[in-house]
Image (tube, grey):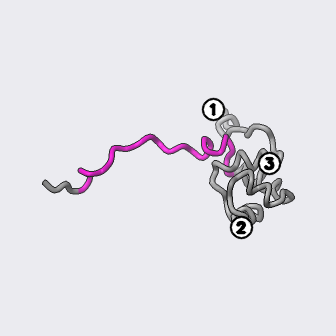
Amino acid sequence: MRQLGNARAKPPGPAKPSVEQLSGGWTFEQYQTRILPALRPIPLPEIERATGLSNATCSRVRRGLQIPNPRHWAALAALAGVGGKAERFSDRIGR
């Protein structure tokens, strides 16, 4: 018998991790205001080693033309020497 519509749909998997979970607690705002400016003096080869991204991608990231996947934000923050731990958004709003 032929199955139609959602009959073949896979059951829902686990929920996708949030940006905060992927980034080690960094928010997009913190990436833009704290991490990105601190990356400017960092040589591209160091950014490449820290993230595993290509030279061209690291160049665009450092210039602010491309936003890396949040999973790289903690490594970039550590490389740039920006605060040991990110201030969690939920802590800022008192939750």
Q: Residue type at mark 1?
A: Arg
Measured as percent of width and height from the top left, residue 14 is found at: 44, 40
For the residues labelled 1 and 3, the Cα–Cα distance comes to 29 Å
Q: Position of residue 5 (x, y in %)?
A: 24, 56
Q: Earlier in the sequence, mark 2 or mark 1?
A: 2
Between disc 1 and disc 3, the foreground one is 3
Q: Residue at x 67, y 41 (%)?
A: 24
Q: Residue at x 67, y 40 (%)?
A: 25
How much space separates mark 2 and mark 3, taking CA atoms?
18 Å
- Spot the residue most to the right: 41
Name the residue at 79% across, 59% down: 45
Earlier in the chain: of badge 1 and badge 3, it is: 3
Q: Which residues are magenta?
A: 5-28
User: Callout 1 environment at 10 Å: few (<14), some (14 to 19), or many (20+)?
Assistant: few
Circle 2 residue: 56
Q: Which residue is mark 3?
A: 79
Q: Name the quadrant containing residue 47.
A: bottom right
Q: What's under tag 2, amino acid-wise?
A: Ala
Q: Is residue 22 magenta?
A: yes
**Image x and y of residue 85, in percent:** 75, 37
- Give amino acid for label 3: Leu
For residue 82, above or below residue 32: above
- Locate residue 19 relative to residue 36 in the image: left or right: left
Q: Measure how far apart labels 2 and 1 are at the Cα level.
A: 40 Å
Residue 37 place in picture, x, y as percent: 81, 56
Outermost residue toward the top in this view: 95
Mark 3 surroundings within 10 Å by alpha-carbon count, few (fewer than 14), some (14 through 19), many (20 or more): some
Q: Which mark is residue 95?
A: 1
In the rendered structure, the answer to whether residue 9 lies left or right of residue 50 reads: left
Earlier in the chain: of badge 2 and badge 3, it is 2
The verdict on residue 54 being magenta is no
